[in-house]
Amino acid sequence: MTTFDDRERAQEAKFAYDAELNFKAEARRNRLLGEWAAGLLGKKGDDARSYALTIVSSDFDEPGDEDVFRKLAHDLADFAEEAAIRAKMVELRAVARQQIVDEI
């Protein structure tokens, strides 16, 4: 085995780790967004948890964040402006990533 092979394997392992971390962080961010939005909508308990899951599942419609944003913008039309929703998405992405890293 050569040093090149070792480096290649290390890069592949890092890529896989980063991809998994990003996937988990996105799912966690979406759940946190759902919980935030549920609070704005006045949902509590099981209703809030159920609503948060609808936000998580809305991310599977298409690649990227726009499907989640559209769902939130539609549901929160009377409660939050689009800029506030986008800002919360960025904020909670960082929170979710840090939570995942802290669990590792």
Image (tube, rainbow, N blue to C red):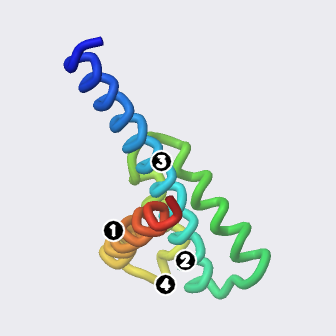
Cα gap from disc 4 to disc 2, whole angstroms:
9 Å
Q: Nearer the viewer, mark 1 or mark 2?
A: 1
Q: Is residue 88 visible?
A: yes
Residue sitting farthest toward the right: 46
Residue under pointer 3: 23
Q: Which mark is residue 90?
A: 1
Q: Nearer the viewer, mark 3 or mark 1?
A: 3
Q: Report the residue at 48% width, 62% height from top.
A: 100
- Amino acid type at image mark 2: Ala
Q: Which mark is residue 37?
A: 2
Quadrant the N terminus occupies: top left
Q: Report the residue at 47% width, 76% height from top.
A: 77
Which comes before the other along the chain, label 1 or label 2?
Answer: 2
Residue under pointer 4: 79
Which comes before the other along the chain, label 4 or label 3?
Answer: 3
Q: Nearer the viewer, mark 4 or mark 2?
A: 2
Q: Report the residue at 46% width, 52% height from top.
A: 67
Q: Is residue 73 visible?
A: no
23 left or right of 1 in image: right
Q: Position of residue 18 (x, y in %)?
A: 37, 44
Which element is circle 3 on?
helix
Q: Are marks 1 and 2 in contact (CB under 8 Å)?
A: no
Q: Report the residue at 32% width, 74% height from top.
A: 87
Q: Position of residue 6 (x, y in %)?
A: 28, 23
Q: Nearer the viewer, mark 4 or mark 3?
A: 3
Quick check: 5 above or below 79? above
Q: Are marks 4 and 2 in contact (CB under 8 Å)?
A: no
